[in-house]
Every structure is written in structure tokens, then in C-alpha cells.
Amino acid sequence: MSQTVSTYSLLRRTLLASAFMLAGLAQAQTGTIKLLVGFPPGGGTDAIARTLAEKLKDQLGTPVIVENKAGAGGQIAAQALKAAAPDGTTFFLSHDHTISILPLVVKNPGFDSARDFVAVAGFATFVNALAVSGGTPAKTMGDYVAWVKAQGAGKGTIGVPAPASVPEFLVKIIGQKYAIDMQAAPYRGSAPMMGDMLGNQISAGVASIPDFIENHKAGKVRIVAVLGGVRQASLPDVPTFAELGMAGFEDVPYYGIFAPTGTPKATIDRFSEAVAKVIAQPDVRERLTAMGLTVGYMTPQQLTTREQAYAQTWARIIKASGFQAQ
């Protein structure tokens, strides 16, 4: 019996060693780690990814490149992660929309978050916000609603970074709250939406604070309301939607990094520890905070728990809205 156990243990150690050796070989062959981003260059998520990638290469001793696979609200990037070899050379930096919301609103997204991905590290939470373009006279939410009502039949259009997203559901709720006909205009990411806002082609947009913050500071757009339970440190003068009478949006979204299922635990742990060290660096924390993030490390298990709770919250909201998965 002992000989059988010994043989089994030896075989198991040999197989594990082979797996790690193959992962290391693949890493050496590529010489880089890819950090997938599901949105175009120039947007908030892209800027966050590039901030982390620059520092992660120092922690890991390996170049980390950002690879933008934009389209379908991050769906293309998520499918690419699913198809990637679980060898520690491909990771996915994503916020809540792709991981938690898409599976609720798309019948066949081409991936199953729980089955196909493994959490690596969470590094921040954030809130979505409503911003108005410089072409409107509005300086507050009340101003914007009054301006929309004054435009003929009281109809308004608000840009959102992706269809069937939290921002799109928020547009519907804004319309219901203020009894105005608000329509969401979906874009392929926040960067093209912001381009139209800066060009006054659209009067307002809903996206994450990181998508708006720089142009808000420059006076090119004006953030007039934010989600979450408290006002944001980066925007102390901007009220929450709860303050404006729209409660129920206090569960804030997250940013995290994911890997293909099957990626060795040692690889996951190493990358996760590198993320923790990077976001602890004062310059990184300062930069991410300035983008409108609340920086905080989450272990793989904590990120998994956070994602599941968030998905459950929005499953209830989406069901109550009557939206049918498409």
C-alpha cells in the first residue's frame, strides 16, 4: 500500500513539475504577458490598464503589454481570454460590465464567467456618473432636466459606452424619475462617446468617473451626479443619485483582473501579489485615485465574492426593469 501511495505521489509531483515547466516555456517563448482590455485606446479602462502594466513589468520581471480587443462591451476580449492557453501569458483587466452584466443581458455571450475565468486580483471600485457636454447650459442635474424638457417634445439622448449596460439601465431610470423621454445611445466604448460629447454631438453621457474626470477638470464636460452611497473624494461638490431621490444604486462596480480557467495557482498567486504591490505604490495609488477610483486590493477569493454579489444585485434590477436577454 505504501509503495502505491509513494508511486502516486511521485507521479503527481512529476506532472505538476511538467505543468509549471510548460507554463514557463510558453512564457519564455513569448517573452511578454498580454493584458487584454475590452475597450478602445483612450478610454478610462485603457488608461488604468496602461498605468498598471507599466509597473507590473517591474514586479514580474517580464514585459506586460496592453492589447485592446474592443467591441461588444468587452465581449470580444472575454472570448479571447476564454480561447487563450492557461499558461500565465494572458490576463484580462475588466470592470463589472463584461464579467457580471453581459451574461445577464446577452443570451449567448460566448463565455461563462464562473466556468471559463478565474479571478486573479481586484484593485479598485468606482462609480458611474452622469456628465453633460459643454454645449448645454446645464450645471446641475436639475438644470439638465429643465433643458431637456425645453427641447421641443422633452426628449433627450444620453450616450452610454455599451448597449444593455448599467449606464443604459440608468438612462431609463432617469427618464422614469423625471418623466422625460430619455433614450440611450450605445457606443463602442467610452472614448468615441466622449469624442461626440466634446464635439457637442450628444448632450450627455453616463459612464465611469475615470472616463469623465480629466475632461471634467478641464471644464469640457460637467459631471452632475454620481452613483454610490457617498459623494466621491475626487468630486466633493457633486451629489449622489440617492441625494437626488434615486436610491438603489449604492452597490458600486469594481475593477479586477482575470485569467483563463486552468491557469496554475502559483501563477495566479504571483500575479495577484504583484498587483497588490503595484497599487500600494504611492504614485500609482495617487494616479488611480485622480482617475476617480477607490483603490483597494482584493484577493482572488474576495474578487470572486464581490463579483457574485454584484451580479445578484443587478440580476434583480434587470429583471424588475422587464429587460429580456437578447
Image (tube, helix red, strand yellow):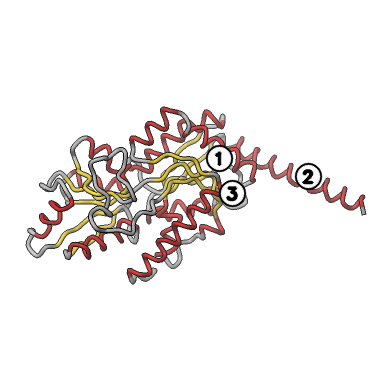
Question: Does residue 22 appear left or right of residue 81 in this picture?
Answer: right
Which numbered disc, 2 or 3, marks the residue closer to the eye?
2
Counting from the top left corner in percent of width and height, residue 168 is at 30, 59
Mark 3 residue type: Ala
Are the two marked residues, 2 and 3, in contact with CB atoms closer than 8 angstroms? no
- Residue highlighted by disc 1: 272
Front-most of residues 117 and 32: 117
Mark 2 residue type: Arg
Q: Residue at x 19, y 58 (%)?
A: 157
Reply above or below: 326 against 73.
below
Q: Which label number is shown at residue 85?
A: 3
Circle nearer the N terminus (2, 3): 2
Which numbered disc, 1 or 2, marks the residue closer to the eye?
1
Quadrant position of the C terminus in the picture: bottom left
Q: Residue at x 31, y 44 (%)?
A: 209
Quarter of the image for residue 14 reads: top right
Q: How many numbered callouts?
A: 3
- Measure the alpha-carbon separation of dots 1 and 3: 18 Å
- Residue highlighted by disc 2: 13
Circle nearer the N terminus (1, 2): 2
Q: Residues within 10 Å of mark 3 (few under 14, many from 20)?
A: some
Question: Does residue 1 appear left or right of residue 304 in this picture?
Answer: right
Mark 1 residue type: Ser
Quarter of the image for residue 320 reads: bottom left
Q: Residues within 10 Å of mark 2 (few under 14, many from 20)?
A: few
Disc 3 element: loop
Quadrant position of the N terminus in the picture: bottom right
Reply above or below: 211 against 117.
above
Question: Does residue 255 appear left or right of residue 42 in this picture?
Answer: right
Counting from the top left corner in percent of width and height, residue 11 is at 81, 48
Counting from the top left corner in percent of width and height, residue 101 is at 41, 59
Q: Which label number is shown at residue 176?
A: none
